[in-house]
Image (cartoon, rainbow, N blue to C red):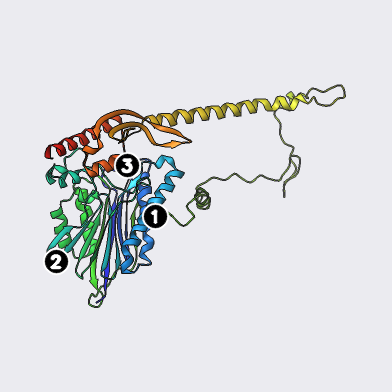
Amino acid sequence: MTIALRYAAYSDVGCLREGNEDSGYAGQNLLAVADGMGGYAGGEVASSIAISSIRTLDSEPPRTDEMAEVLQRAVEQANASLSRRIMEEPQLENMGTTLTAMLWAGPRVALIHIGDSRAYLMRGPRFEQITHDHTLVQTLVDEGKITEEEVATHPQRSLILRALDGKSPVDPDISISEAKAGDRYLLCSDGLSGVVSKKTIHETLATEADPRGAAKKLIELAIRGGGPDNITAVVADVIETETDHEGPTRTAQVVGAADQRRENVDQGNDTPARRAQELRGSGDTAEMDPIRDDAPGQAPPGGAYQEPHNDDHDEYEAPPTNRRGRPEPEYRQKRWWPVILVFLLVVAIVAGATYYFGRQYVNGQYYVGPSSNGETVSIYQGINTDIAGFNLSEEVEDTGITLESLSEADRQSVENTFPTESLADAQERVDTLETAADAREGSG
């Protein structure tokens, strides 16, 4: 028996977002969804890089005994690409992305997952989520501190504990399974799973026979539910090629930010020089008009001689001369010193403005991480990095919460540090950690 995939991928910006930070991919051997995050278009960059890094696996599927290792390396390569991009464009420092991907080799399937995008399997009457969310609220559910019903209203429901961010080590979940003819898989971002109930998703997948109709219907349901986030859905049916009349899908589908940006990564060509060349080739940069060779006082080709006009002719004064009738040497110096002075003034203004706005940006950033003694949780102002030995962050509050009192997931999150939008947001997240720690000690 030979099995193959019939699939469809769709993505929608939703009702409230200005741009689409989701990316999706569907091919004969690879399905993937990435949900980007971060300001300054960082989310769309991150998800595009993740999809572009792993989509090469679609054309050359590995041996079945190497699937997990190959998929792990591809994700590590994606994380390294994010790191290089952040070094080139520091304003993208806070970007990151989830990634859920399935690699196929015959009936054997390797699933890799990091973040809160999800994969579901419908096999006959059974429907189940086959990924586990890497979020704070899911950790609290696992530990019995909150219920599934409380997740939707929890103030930290959007806090992701694991993601591809170019800074933290890659720590995905990987599993190997066997697919069967008749299986239907769904990969989606939380713009779908966070709005449409699991029951409704199951009913839609069970009633819509075609993957295209199922994916479109799911996105429509998320939009009817308010569409607060970008929505991406990849639906794939496992078919038996000998008995299925319609046959598998042959063309790869790229949707969302990855389709808009078409990132090129990890081929030795992702450099500032390459991107500048692409801009020149695409007409996105302006070029100066060519300088004409016609010198003043010469007739242009095919035209009559014209004396150049000079409005200042009547007021022209000859430069001062010495006793031999030659111009004084100070004349050229007097012409250039104002230009040099203006240039130096502009350089000083630009440098001052760069320092001022750079400092304003750094002072407006906060993150939570281990204290200087490595034993407690602290709030820092600035960016968790050094430039030429100069630390761009300052510890503003030692909360006194010990790392030992935290759960393993919370401790790893703090040790890797996580950025916050403001001091108030940092304090709110610390309060959540303290509540979780107190509940953990009380249950112990």
Label 2–label 3 contact, CB within 8 A: no
Please provide percent x and percent y for residue 203: 14, 58
Q: Secondary structure at mark 3?
A: loop
**Amino acid beneath label 1:** Gln
Please provide percent x and percent y for residue 144: 13, 44
User: Mark 3 — residue?
Assistant: 416
Please tell me the numbered disc located at residue 100. Answer: none
441 or 142, nearer to the observer: 441
Q: Secondary structure at mark 2?
A: loop
Nearer the observer, disc 1 or disc 2? 1
249 or 165, nearer to the observer: 165
**Amino acid beneath label 3:** Asn
User: Mark 1 — residue?
Assistant: 77
Q: Quadrant of the C terminus?
A: top left
Image quarter of residue 183: bottom left
Q: Who comes first in sequence, dot 1 or dot 2?
A: 1
Classify residue 370 as left or right of residue 93. left
331 or 401, nearer to the observer: 401
251 or 37, nearer to the observer: 37
Q: Who comes first in sequence, dot 3 or dot 1?
A: 1
**Amino acid beneath label 2:** Gly
Label 3–label 1 contact, CB within 8 A: no
Nearer the observer, disc 3 or disc 1? 3
Which residue in the rendered view is the most extreme toward the right? 324
Q: Who comes first in sequence, dot 2 or dot 3?
A: 2
Classify residue 361 as left or right of residue 131. right
